[in-house]
């Protein structure tokens, strides 16, 4: 509020332009989606939510947010693309199970530093040697740690 109270506002600014400026200030700790980013079917779509995140000096696209997953998953191929030494993987005996009741043994777990929007996270992933359509999967464990508050009304993810 201090910034808004002390900001110089030109006399001929439109209300819409002023509102956009104010919204940018308040969005400092949020990942937001505007209406022009909606698919043709609008808010009624049921497509997956993908983010782009930063890891080290690389941008990772197709990061799936999946509140149905109890673990965060990193395909082994993603680590290879990022040139992350597989020596960092801590061996474990975890078997990750899907809806098909089948399972896939984890190669191990790894901790990665990710920047998601304006926020930095230290996230533990189960590393799987699988062919999937995403580069990382963020499950409920990340959602709870991030203290996300999804708002379908405004299509916003807010970090508190």
Image (cartoon, rainbow, N blue to C red):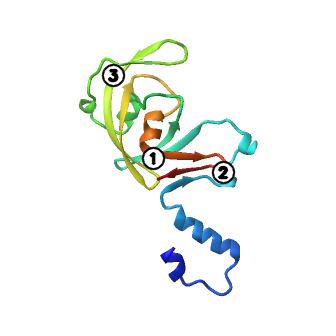
Please, which residue is most extreme toward the bottom here? 11
Mark 2–mark 1 distance (CA, rounded to whole Å) = 18 Å
Please give left or right for residue 36 compared with residue 142 in the image. Answer: right
Q: Residue at x 69, y 75 (%)?
A: 15
Q: Secondary structure at mark 3?
A: loop
Please give left or right for residue 142 compared with residue 67 in the image. Answer: left
Nearer to me, 149 or 87:
149
Residue corresponding to mark 1: 53
- Position of residue 158 measured from the top left corner of the image (x, y, whole percent): 52, 52
Mark 2–mark 3 distance (CA, rounded to whole Å) = 36 Å
- Structural crowding at the residue carrying mark 3, measured as other residues with C-alpha within 10 Å and reported as few (<14), some (14–19) or many (≥20): many
Please, which residue is most extreme toward the left here? 87
Of labels 1 and 3, earlier in sequence is: 1
Q: Residue at x 43, y 38 (%)?
A: 142
Residue corresponding to mark 3: 107
Residue corresponding to mark 2: 37
Q: Residue at x 42, y 16 (%)?
A: 104
Q: Quadrant of residue 85?
A: top left
Whether residue 34 is visible to the viewer of this picture, yes or no, is yes
Q: Check the image and report above or below for 28 versus 150.
A: below
Of labels 2 and 1, earlier in sequence is: 2
Nearer to me, 136 or 28:
28
């Amino acid at each position: 509020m201090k910034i808004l109270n002390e900001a110089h506002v030109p006399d001929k600014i439109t209300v819409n332009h002023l509102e956009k400026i104010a919204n940018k200030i308040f969005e400092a700790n949020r990942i937001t989606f505007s209406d022009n980013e909606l698919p043709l079917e609008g808010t009624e779509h049921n497509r997956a939510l993908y983010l782009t995140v930063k890891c080290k000096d690389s941008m990772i696209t197709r990061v799936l947010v999946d509140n149905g997953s109890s673990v965060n998953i990193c395909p082994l191929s993603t680590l290879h693309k990022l040139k992350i030494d597989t020596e960092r993987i801590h061996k474990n005996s975890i078997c990750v199970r899907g809806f098909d009741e089948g399972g896939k043994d984890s190669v191990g777990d790894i901790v990665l530093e990710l920047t998601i929007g304006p926020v930095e996270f230290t996230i533990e992933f189960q590393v799987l040697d699988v062919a999937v359509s995403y580069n990382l999967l963020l499950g409920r464990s990340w959602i709870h740690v991030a203290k996300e508050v999804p708002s379908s009304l405004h299509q916003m993810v807010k970090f508190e």
